[in-house]
Amino acid sequence: QLEIVESGGGLIHPGGSLRLSCAFSGFRARPFNYYIVGWFREAPGKGREGVAWISRSEGMTDYLQSVKGRFTVSRDHGRRTSTLEMNDLKSEDTAVYFCALGVPKNYVPSFNQDEYRYWGQGIQVTVSA
């Protein structure tokens, strides 16, 4: 059974940095590089929104407009991990963050949550003075 373990969340002051990581294991029918990796977040009272995704080959990434230039997504095929580097954090970045594995329709990654099959348990990031 595919397993996703998230780590790295916590409490950080505005302007600070955090690194979130997801470790993936238990691949059976399809290997890690079959999937795109997406990062999502859910703030209190708000719906879940896409933050970043990275394609299978690492050649393509995309970001939520409000995090562009501050967040960087990456993946390591050898270690079967993905990392979300978050810099210059703001209070509005406070949320529970999720990583997920997806299979894009028409081979084009997106933030469409219906395309993501496996989800991490979520990890809290709180940005506060």
Image: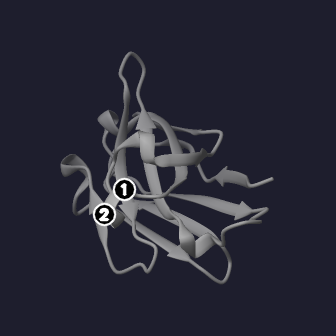
**Residue 104 screen position, x and y as percent:** 40, 58
Q: CA distance from mark 2 to mark 1?
A: 6 Å
**Residue type of the residue flagged with mark 2:** Val
User: Residue visible at 30% across and 34% down?
Assistant: 92
Residue that carries the numbered disc 1 in the rendered image: 105
**Residue 74 screen position, x and y as percent:** 46, 72
Q: Looking at the figure, which quarter contains the C terminus?
A: top left
User: Residue visible at 63% across and 45% down?
Assistant: 120
- Going by the image, does 49 lie left or right of 97? left
Report the number of discs. 2
**Residue type of the residue flagged with mark 1:** Lys
Which numbered tag is attached to residue 92?
none
User: Residue visible at 59% across and 60% down?
Assistant: 21
- Going by the image, does 38 lie left or right of 100? left
Tell me if label 2 and label 1 are in contact, CB under 8 Å: yes
Judged from this view, the residue extending furthest toward the left is: 65
Judged from this view, the residue extending furthest toward the front is: 106
**Residue 44 screen position, x and y as percent:** 42, 20
Label 2 secondary element: loop
- Going by the image, does 64 lie left or right of 5? left
Which numbered tag is attached to residue 108?
2
User: Observer-nearest residue: 124 or 30?
Assistant: 30
Q: Is residue 44 positioned above or below 61 on the image?
A: above
